[in-house]
Image: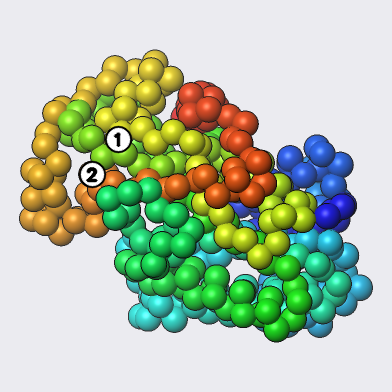
Amino acid sequence: MAVKTLVVTGANGFVGRALCATLVARGHAVTGLVRRSGGCVEGVSEWVHSASDFEGLESAWLGTARADCVIHLAARVHVMRDTAIDPLASYRAANVDGMLRVARAAHANGARRLLLLSSIKALGDADRGHPLGEGEPPMPDDPYGQSKLEAERALREFARESGLECVIVRPPLVYGPGVRANFLQLMSAIARGIPLPLGAVGARRSFVFVGNLVDALLHCAIDERAAGETFHVTDGYDPTVTELARMLAVQLRAPARLIPVRSSWLRLAGRILGRSAQVERLVGELQLDGSHIRRVLGWQPPYTVEDGLRETTAWYRSTH
């Protein structure tokens, strides 16, 4: 598939900026479809469509941007303390209805393929005693995961009806320069020398460096063999939580003040404090099987975990 022109929704976000920079560097013409002006990397043609959840996009697209492939990154992301009256309805409006509007508009305007960035949360927040493969029965644990699963199903159905090629990528937690939320909080605590009760957490969790995810997305956008596929993308090595904290401490040049507390005690503390979900993300196993994309596309992550952590911590030290 000789892709030359791409539209990227959410082009001014964490993953979007990294993806667009790589696409431009490799000679592709990129249009960034965003809700608010500003934030796109140099070389991207910015297209502002401010309507909520891409309402009116199909008519607005006419004559605006050509695309061989649309990479749909825009989403209502996971919110730890959601204040919406009906969180599932809010997630559906953005992640299902909005995605379908993008798919319909893309197809109507000549795009051959739509690549959806989903999430491993479409399957759940924990593995089942073995790394999760793409065909695992979905058991999402929250409204965000449910909306991502529904978006995947809706896209596949639209693809069957319309002939639009679709590709779905499910990453675990994505880290890299500019990362926010829990990963940034962990780096900050380690950098400040705060003692953490993570010295005996043997749970292994899959992660993906943004550079590896971007490389996989590019392959999924242009490779003929990706059509109709769903892929899990990881760094290829799953550290324990304790190991990750120690690796971060080395890269941050900070002491690793990790107190060896049993996972069972951490879970008990989580229940007492009403923070079981947050604790489970630290002590629960979540490994993904990333072998399918290697078999189908021959893809290998170009960066090691050490490479990714080095770039992420260098960014942190330069900005904090």
Dot 1 falls on a residue whose secondary structure is helix
- Determine the residue positioned at 37% across, 23% down: 247
Cα separation, mark 1 vs mark 2, equals: 8 Å
Q: In this rendering, does residue 50 appear at all?
A: yes
Residue 264 placement (x, y as % from top left): 10, 45
Which quadrant holds residue 168? bottom right
Residue at the outermost front position: 295
- Determine the residue positioned at 72% across, 55% down: 225
Which quadrant holds residue 277? bottom left
Residue 53 placement (x, y as % from top left): 61, 75
Return the mark for residue 241. Answer: 1
- Left or right placement of residue 186 versus residue 169 in this view: left
The image shows residue 162, relative to residue 48, as above or below, that is below
Return the mark for residue 107. Answer: none
The image shows residue 68, relative to residue 256, as above or below, that is below
Q: Quadrant of the N terminus?
A: bottom right
Question: Which residue is at the front of the view, 251 or 117?
Answer: 117
Return the mark for residue 283. Answer: 2
Question: Which residue is at the front of the view, 204 or 22?
Answer: 204
Residue 216 placement (x, y as % from top left): 64, 45
> Which amino acid lies under the numbered mark 1 shown in the image of this protein?
Val
Q: In this rendering, does residue 101 appear at all?
A: no
> Which amino acid lies under the numbered mark 2 shown in the image of this protein?
Val
Q: Residues within 10 Å of mark 1 (few under 14, many from 20)?
A: many
Scheme of colours in the image: rainbow
Q: Are marks 1 and 2 in contact (CB under 8 Å)?
A: yes
The image shows residue 319, relative to residue 28, as above or below, that is above
- Left or right placement of residue 318 versus residue 42 in this view: left
Dot 2 falls on a residue whose secondary structure is helix
